[in-house]
Amino acid sequence: MFNDTFDTIAYSYFKSDAIIETETGTYANREANITQQSITWNHSLGEVLSALLQNDLQLKSFEEFDYSPYDCFSHTIEVSPKQFRIKHLESKIPMVFALKAIKP
């Protein structure tokens, strides 16, 4: 949804087609002398959960986290070991989620 600097919403939460961007650096080294095209998709929570239900999976747990375990975004700060947040957004947005589902 957000642009690379997390200062504006650039894409719809419900965007169904690919998001194509040209990026410099890599997620592991943002200073790397590499320019590449990335293709990503937004998947709403509703889309993810519906896919589980449509495939007869039973949701056993679901958690959202206000940090990422990876330093893979711009303007991140490490708030605890292996917990990264967007500096100016603090803990105001979910960064990742975890779920557990089983096929009965």
Image (cartoon, helix red, strand yellow):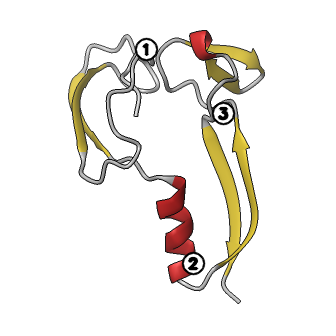
Q: Quadrant of the C terminus?
A: bottom right
Residue tagged 3 = 69
The total of numbered circles placed on residues is: 3
Q: Earlier in the sequence, mark 2 or mark 3?
A: 2
Residue at screen point 66% across, 33% down? 69
Residue type for callout 2: Leu
What is the quadrant of residue 84 in the picture?
top right
Callout 2: few (<14), some (14-19), or many (20+) C-alpha neighbours within 10 Å?
few
Q: Quadrant of the N terminus?
A: top left
Q: Earlier in the sequence, mark 1 or mark 3?
A: 1
Q: Position of residue 59 (x, y in %)?
A: 70, 71
Q: Position of residue 97 (x, y in %)?
A: 65, 47
Residue at screen point 47% across, 52% down? 44
Residue tagged 1 = 7
Q: Earlier in the sequence, mark 1 or mark 2?
A: 1
Give the Cα separation between the discs numbered 1 and 3.
21 Å
Tell me the tag on residue 53. Answer: 2
Q: Position of residue 77 (x, y in %)?
A: 64, 12
What is the quadrant of residue 95 in the picture?
top right
Residue type for callout 3: Pro
Residue type for callout 1: Asp
Q: Position of residue 73 (x, y in %)?
A: 49, 23
